[in-house]
Image (tube, rainbow, N blue to C red):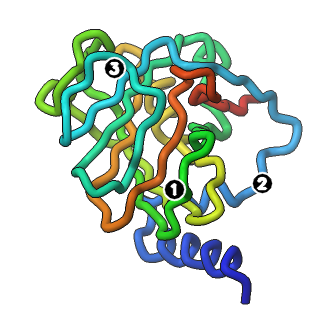
Amino acid sequence: MSAQRVAYLARVLTCMLLGSACSSHGALLPIPAGSQRLVQTPSGIAVLTQAEAQTGLPGDITFGGPNGRSALYLQFSPEWRAHGAPLRGFLVLEPLTGAAPEPEPVAIEAWRVRAPWHADRLHAWSDKPELAPPYARTLTAGAPARSLRLDITELLRFAANHPEMDQGIALIAGRGSGHGASFATGMNGDAVPRLEVYTR
C-alpha cells in the first residue's frame, strides 16, 4: 500500500474516532452538484507563535514545529453571507515555496474567534483573542507538501446565522517533534490563504 493511501486512511480513521469534532473527512466528500463557488482572500491576517513576538506579518506560518504553539488569525469580508448559509466551505492554505515537507501528519484545528481583533495589535502569544466553538480539525498529509484544505462548513454556518458574532477564524496547532508544516501567508509573494464557499 502506498504512503499516500496510508495517509488518506489515517485521516479517515481519525475522523471516525473523533466524531463530529473532526471535519477533515468533509474535505474528502464531493461538492454538491450545481453549487456556486465563491473565493475570497483575507481582509485581515495575523500570525502568533509562542516562540517569539511578531513585529509584522511573516511570509509563512509553521504548524507543529518544535518551538511551541502557533496560530493563524483570518478575517474575511462578509460578502459571502449574502448567499445565506453555505452548502460547504473550506479554508485553503498553500505550502511555502521551497520549505522542506514535514513527513509526519500535523493536527490543525480551526476555531471561531470570539472577540474582536485587529492584525496590527497582535504581536505576542498573550495577545491572542479568545476562541469558541464550533471548531474543525484536520491532519496535514505529510510528505510531499500539499495544499491544506480544511472543511469549515459548520463555522461558516454559525457565522451566517449569527453575523453579529463573526470575528473571523483561527487555525491553531501545538508543538510537534519535527520541523513542522509551513504554509504561505502571501506576504512574500506566495499564495494567500483563501476561503472557498459553495452556495446554492
Q: How many other residues sit within 10 Å of disc 3, few (<14), some (14-19) or many (≥20)?
A: some
Of 80 and 10, the residue lying toward us: 10
CA gap, disc 3 to disc 2? 29 Å
Q: Report crowding for label 1: few under 14, some 14 to 19, many 20 or more residues within 10 A (C-alpha).
A: many
Q: Residue at x 77, y 29 (%)?
A: 37
Q: Nearer the viewer, mark 1 or mark 3?
A: 1
Q: Quadrant of residue 127?
A: top left
Give how far across and how far down residue 177 sits, in percent.
31, 67
Check disc 3 and report the residue beneath it: 165
In the image, taking residue 27 as reference, residue 176 lies left or right, namely left
Circle 3 SS class: helix
Q: Quadrant of the C terminus?
A: top right
- The image quarter in which residue 18 lies: bottom left
Q: Which residue is mark 1?
A: 23
- Does residue 76 sit above or below 10 in this rendering? above
Question: Mark 2 = which residue?
Answer: 30
